[in-house]
Amino acid sequence: MIKKTLLWLLSIVAGAILLGWFFWPANWSVRGPVFDFITGRQAATPSDAMLQARLKLPAGFRIGIFADNVPHARMMAVTKTGDIAVSSMRDGNVILLHRDVNADGKSDGRTILFSGLNVPHGIAFHDGYIYIAETGRIVRAPYNDAARSVGALETVFDGLPPGGNHRTRTIGFGPDGWLYVTVGSSCNVCVEDHPYRAAMLRMRPNGKDAIVYAHGLRNTVGFDWQPGTRRLYGTDNGRDLLGDNIPNCEINYIEEGQFYGWPYTYDDKVVDPDVGAGHSKEIARARVMEHGLGAHVAPLGIRFIAPSLSVPGLENSALVALHGSWNRSTLSGYKVVALHFAADDTITEEDFLTGFEKDGDVIGRPVDIVTGSDGSIYISDDYAGVVYRVGWDTIPVSSDQVIAPEDKTDGDPVDAALEVPSAALLAQGAALFEQNNCAQCHEPLATTGKPSVEIFKGLKGRYGVEEVMDILDIPPGPMPRPEISDAERKALAVYLLSRSN
């Protein structure tokens, strides 16, 4: 009976999603891997060749995969010995990625520190303990760095409102030694009943003397303290469903007792059309953002680069992970940006790591950023389930020996299999295309009578044969995996690329 009831509920939810997809108002765009995010589906781990072809960094930096198979990798924290703890939010785990001792750019192993947690997200190390923020409480356990072992969990604070539209909780210890935690709103835009919603709290490490430190912060997922000034900055996700370009997602300078506008106002004290009327007093005292990142880019982790690391080009700068839009007709975000802070505290922004999204194709969604003592930059990706390592100078990354494909004069990657594809190979690929009924989704509407997924458009300029073979081997949903051999997969890849314009 229970099984039938669950199946019935699932069918209702699926039907509602489909109806919403077809009848969604024109100004409420749904784009990007939103259904993958809802269902928890992971993208394929990018190959070294794909990383080289797609991801772009400033001159002198390199990127590789530090650890893969880290499902839904979210927030991270570095131990005293250089290991990295990362929350696997949907699986309920906290995973310890061992530091790279053999200098191959990859984690030397892993330990599952905790399992069965309720939406674990924020992680922090403090005075011999590991702290973890679940959706409704903060817990901690003794942590032994040398043994990579943990003791029994104890509850530090159990008064967080759980769940809601924004169910993640982020924690961090400030220069003052107090524990800070952010709690997102329960909704897109509404007047909250619980005082801890859309707020930052501060408490002692044992959970005592908790206060609302700042409020009116719709969903501040990431925060960090600027070296030297000790000013606290946080990322905040702006509301949805007002169109492509409003409101901004924000960088805020967070101070005790300040109100940051949500839900009554956004940007430079613009009155919210849904709940802002009649709240002129609240709007007048609202603190405006320090920097606008653009609409719907979904900023998550923020990390200031310590001056002692001497990372070139990132002096007095912070890196911010833009998880990427779902409520925009053209995708935005899906990258890491650098924020440069001038002496007068003005902020300028420039791209640091790009290429996770290209022409609507998404291979990753950056979440959090931490740094190693050698200047390594680690970036978690909850869509591909990996942690990347960005290196510079002599810092090793896993793809150091991979040579990026040389460009042709027209900018397309060189691929020997495409330079002179044999007639037999093309014929074999065309036959496989027909046998696997690929035309059902990938031919024009006039041919099949069904909508087309335009996989051929610009394909050759974005991928080589090996990358297309990887996609065919681990395809993005809802594309089925063709049951073919490696040789057949290569023939099909060559055929698809030959049809690209």
Image (cartoon, rainbow, N blue to C red):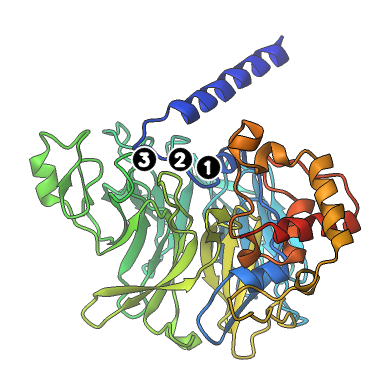
Q: Nearer the viewer, residue 64 or 187?
A: 64
Q: Amino acid at mark 3?
A: Ser
Spatial separation of the CA atoms under disc 2 and disc 3:
21 Å
Q: Does 120 sit above or below residue 403?
A: above
Considering only order in the chain, which callout, 3 or 2, is on the residue closer to the N terminus? 2
Say if residue 149 shows up in the picture: no
The dot on residue 34 is 1
Residue 379, image x, y percentages = 57, 66
Secondary structure at badge 1 equals helix
Which quadrant of the structure image shows residue 288?
bottom left
Asked if residue 6 shows in the view, the reply is yes
Q: Nearer the viewer, residue 438 or 398?
A: 438
Instruction: Mark 3 or mark 1: name the one nearer the start of the chain.
Output: 1
422 relative to 76 in the view: left or right: right
User: Which residue is rendered at x = 44% and y = 41% of the image?
Assistant: 166
Is 348 above or below relative to 162? Answer: below
Would you say 280 lies left or right of 69 here?
Answer: left
Tag 2: Cα neighbours inside 10 Å, few (<14), some, or many (≥20)? some
SS class, disc 2: loop
Closest to the observer, 208 or 312: 312
- Which part of the image, by quadrant, shows the C terminus? bottom right
Could you say where residue 430 lies in the image, as x and y percent from the top left? 81, 50
| Count of all numbered marks drawn on residues in the image | 3
Query: Where is mark 2, residue-wise?
Result: 30
Q: As shown in the figure, which amino acid type bears the numbered disc 1?
A: Val
Residue at coordinates 56% horizontally, 62% vertically from top-left? 356
Report the disc number at residue 185: 3
Residue 94 in percent (x, y) is at 65, 53
Give the foreground label among 2 and 3.
2
